[in-house]
Image: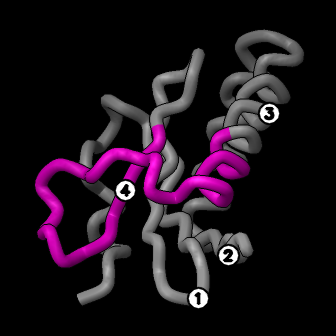
């Protein structure tokens, strides 16, 4: 049984912002970006343990990430008992670790 995915509202906003940015650079690129995100989220839902641990996060916090192919982004998520919570669609170089405030205390 797969767990449902819940995306933080801030993550949804950054996803749309990034897709718009890519679409402005080249027509269709924003859609390619969204397709890569969709594939990554589907993979996370099927195999949440397949993501790598997030460096610098305490071991007791189940934060993982899956790096996108073709784009400098990662999906940062928590595998919780009842759901998978997407914390961020994080660019590799912009504001590293900004999403850490979304981690549970």
Lower position in the chain sequence, tag 4 or tag 3: 3
Q: Residue at x 12, y 69 (%)?
A: 58
Look at mark 3 in the image and give the residue it sits on: 35
In the rendered structure, the answer to whether residue 84 lies left or right of residue 34 reads: left
Q: CA distance from mark 1 to mark 4?
A: 16 Å
Closest to the camera, between mark 4 and mark 3, is: 4
Q: Earlier in the sequence, mark 1 or mark 4?
A: 4
Residue lying farthest to the top in this orientation: 26
Q: Considering only vertical position in the picture, is 92 above or below 17?
A: above
- Please indicate whether residue 65 sits to the left or right of residue 40 in the image: left
- In the rendered view, how is the structure colored? one colour
Mark found first going from the N terminus, 4 or 2: 2
Q: Which mark is residue 64?
A: 4
Residue at numbered disc 1: 82
Q: Helix, strand or loop at disc 2?
A: loop
- Disc 2 from disc 3: Cα separation: 21 Å
Residue 26, percent from left and from top: 78, 10
Is label 4 in a helix, a strand or a loop? strand
Marks 2 and 1: in contact by CB < 8 Å?
yes
Q: Which of the two labelled residues, at mark 1 and mark 2, occupies the earlier sequence position?
A: 2
Q: Earlier in the sequence, mark 2 or mark 3?
A: 2
Q: Can residue 20 be spotted in the picture?
A: no
The magenta span reads: 40-66
Q: Nearer the viewer, mark 4 or mark 2?
A: 2
Whole-angstrom CA distance, mark 1 to mark 2, is: 6 Å
Asked if labels 4 and 1 touch by Cβ distance under 8 angstroms, the answer is no
Local secondary structure at mark 1: loop
Residue farthest front in this picture:
1
């Amino acid at each position: 049984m797969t767990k449902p995915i819940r995306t933080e509202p801030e993550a949804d906003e950054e996803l749309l912002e990034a897709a718009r940015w890519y679409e402005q650079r080249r027509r269709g690129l924003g859609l390619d970006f969204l397709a890569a995100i969709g594939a990554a989220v589907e993979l996370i839902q099927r195999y949440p343990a397949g993501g790598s641990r997030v460096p610098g996060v305490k071991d007791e916090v189940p934060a993982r990430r899956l790096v996108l192919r073709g784009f400098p982004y990662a999906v940062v998520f928590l595998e919780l008992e009842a759901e998978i919570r997407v914390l961020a669609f994080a660019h590799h170089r912009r504001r590293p670790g900004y999403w850490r405030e979304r981690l549970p205390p």
